[in-house]
Image (spheres, rainbow, N blue to C red):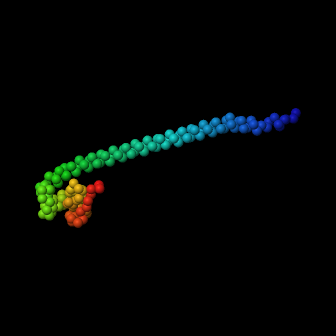
Amino acid sequence: MQLNVEHWKPHKKSVFRFFLGYFVPLFLAVTFIFIGLLISDYFRSIELINQNEKLHINIVKKALIRDLIDIGPDLKILIGSDQFKEYLKAPDNNNKKKLENTFSLFAEQRRIYAQIRFIDVEGWEKVRVDFNHSKVLSIADEQLQNKSDR
């Protein structure tokens, strides 16, 4: 008995139909699943980034509130001082020196402020002391700056 080899050869049309019928749909399904996973992962990453940013904002917000609560009493002490009130009444060199001395003493004792300054309504520094490396320095008039752009 002789085998008919022609019978076992696949026809080009049947291979193409098999390919179209099975491989292409399978490829498309895998591709769509992969794209879906990528999109899902992207949105999950965006959500994690948003949550992380909200957490950082809350941390900064709490730190700012804490800092403002901490400096509130210091600000009340400085603006309530007789030297500050006298300088506001008469901003001459004598009263300025007294206010600089008050700012200097305060900076030296508190040791947490790099600068203490009085800025007028136009944004000009009128009195400023810098605290750096345990040393307090009163800033001369010609070095005072306009901070109105801040």
**Residue found 40% across the figure and 45% down from its top:** 52
75 in relation to 10, above or below: below
Along the viewing direction, whichever of 124 and 6 lies nearer the viewer: 124
Q: Quadrant of residue 10?
A: top right
Along the viewing direction, whichever of 18 and 119 lies nearer the viewer: 119
What x and y, as percent, mark residue 76? 17, 50
Along the viewing direction, whichever of 83 and 4 lies nearer the viewer: 83
**Residue found 21% across the figure and 54% down from its top:** 121
25 in relation to 112, above or below: above
Q: In this view, which residue lies farthest toward the front?
A: 122
What x and y, as percent, mark residue 23? 66, 38
What x and y, as percent, mark residue 91? 14, 60
Q: Is residue 134 visible?
A: no
Q: Quadrant of residue 146?
A: bottom left
Along the viewing direction, whichever of 150 and 101 lies nearer the viewer: 150
Q: Tell me if 47 is positioned left or right of 13 in this view.
A: left
**Residue found 27% across the figure and 56% down from its top:** 148
Q: In this view, which residue lies farthest toward the right?
A: 1
What x and y, as percent, mark residue 20? 68, 37
